Image (cartoon, rainbow, N blue to C red):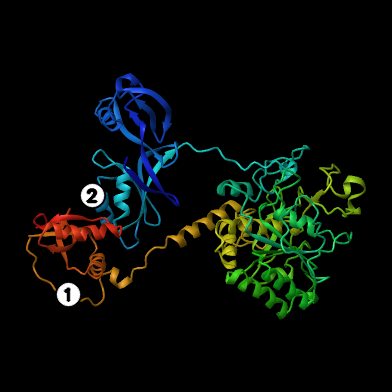
Amino acid sequence: MKKLIVKSGKNDLVLKKSRTLVGIKPKNKKVKAEDVGVKAEILSHLGGFKLVTLDRGRGSVDKKLDEVRTKKEVAVGTHVYHVEGSKRPLVPTGEIYIIFEPDTNEEERNIVLEEYALELVEKRENDTIIAKVTANSPNPLKVAQYLSKISMVKVAEPDLDTLLDEYAITISDPLFKHAWHLKNPGFVPDIDYRLKKDADAKVVDAWNRIGNPGSNKIVVAVIDNGFDLSHPDFGQKVFKPYDLWNQSSNIIQGDPRFTHGTPCASVAIAAANGHGIVGAAPNAKFMPISGTSFSIRATEEMFTKAVENGADIISCSWGTTDPSFAPGPLKEAAIAKAAREGRNGKGCIILYAGGNDDLDYLSYYATHPDVIAVGASTSQDEHASYSNRGRELTVVAPSNGDWPITAARANWDEGTSLRGSGDFKYWADGKSRGAGYKHFGGTSSSTPLVAGICALMLSENPDLTAKEVKEILIKTADKIGNPSEYVNGHSVKYGHGRVNADKAVAEAIRLKDEKNNPRPVVEENIAKGKGLFKFTVERQPSVGYGVQIGVFAEYGNVLIAAEKLQREFDSSVVVNINELRGKTVYKVVVGPFATKTAANRIWKKMIDTGRDAFVTNLKNLK
């Protein structure tokens, strides 16, 4: 059985016709199955068709479908297909998504539609249209194949419908229901407390978009103190740890003065392992770098170690708003070097917390131009009152200020006496959600949340530079708060808005697709028919044969096509100039050739290069 290869999204699908199934559209609901030869209805709706088997006796499904198409009760009939090696049915809806090359004009696009009797359904931005087949068109899959070989068409993708698996990211960790910052249901599950539904970072939406919670190839470094590496949410995730204080891979643990690193890291990368909480990027590797310091040497060392050991992202939930301890040029250079030279030149993504001082300026570390400065929003989608404000603020992310975040707790964490005794030391309402966890917040929590989102972005597009990641976060953030607080898209309270993981991941994917399928660059002057060209013009008699490659309305495109064809096939090119609807059009033909056999040889070479071409008798081009 003949195979068809069609483009579908990122893939090329190898399709075969179903031997038993077809799709039909009855003209009305009163049509009886037996009147149109239907043996059994398999699905009542797929791509606008009823999926059926036909009572075909010993005849082929092709022959029987042709008979059904002639019946007055049937509006449309179509073959059903299967991807090679699969039994899942696919139905072409009849629509084709066409992306034209940017140097084509509307008239040329209309010629393409007329060539295959297509009807325009919708025009979109970026040179994209949606067209559908008519009764005079070939099979939509074949039309898409033909279109994809035309030089004016960048992409031609037939719309296919099929049954999908019902996927959702199922997280069994018992405290996941408390992760309102990942997906806010509008309430706290175990108490009567109302949150603002959807006031979250859209992390679960991002997981569902990519079909998983990120890649295990992405490394998130957290520079801090107090890492409990025995915590079950860190599991087997620890990767190349380093302790600045003892200059080794043995992280100092157990000092009750230092517990901050454990909850920070958990917000970014806590594993989805059926225990406790889940981080924004639960599949990412965790690189703990212990020992924050004001020292220039230590600052250089912490970033150097992160880069040398393969960190993709560096999360720092610490800093200072004391001008006496603002980082000087050497520290700034250490940060800049990691941000520009890490990841083999793509740059490490570095995040700093804006600070929790309720000030009108950020932590000085967060003002570095190469870092992502993170502030905090609340479960009501409002500015967290403690979160510092400033013109360098990049984005905000959900944290406490209304209802806190649930995070991992180091086993030596004694809690805070400010909350009283017992469970109030760990939980805002005094209600324990389990040992090893606590309520957490501040920009210390919002920063690793954004770090985890960056890990999801790199999971889908690891080629993004640090600068591109920051630009995507800015571009895709949701504007929250009063619109009047934004000046030129930026607010000192919210930065460019509340981070949106789903939009950020979608943009990362789009940029990857764009990079993998770049649009050809056409010299502007040539596209307009300008420049110096060598002409040898003579009248061509309408005898012999040629190989036609297209019809053009723009003279500049004729020049481009003719130059390429002459160079590639070492043959002359003739142009038929004619009129269509009162407009001049140009048919470009390689030739002439004395015999059809000679023309066929060139035609085969063109087909081998992926061009859509056909042999024509020049007497038809008078």
Q: Residue at x 77, y 61 (%)?
A: 356
Q: Which residue is mark 2?
A: 115
Quadrant of the drawing holding the C terminus: bottom left
Give amino acid for label 2.
Glu
Q: Position of residue 380 (x, y in %)?
A: 70, 47
Q: Which mark is residue 218?
A: none
Rendered position, 476 above or below 300: above
Q: Which residue is mark 1?
A: 535
Q: Position of residue 50 (x, y in %)?
A: 39, 29
The front one of 272 and 326 is 272
Q: Residue at x 24, y 28 (%)?
A: 70
Q: Position of residue 28 (x, y in %)?
A: 34, 25
- Drawn side of residue 539 relative to residue 97, left or right: left
Q: Is residue 75 visible?
A: yes
- Drawn side of residue 263 relative to residue 197, left or right: right
Between the C-alphas of marks 2 and 1, the distance is 30 Å
The front one of 102 and 345 is 345
Give amino acid for label 1.
Phe
Rate crowding at label 2 as few (under 14), some (14 to 19) or many (20 or more) other CA atoms within 10 Å.
few
Rendered position, 12 above or below 361: above
Say which quarter of the image contains residue 58. Answer: top left
Identify the element where label 1 is drawn.
loop
Quadrant of the drawing holding the N terminus: top left
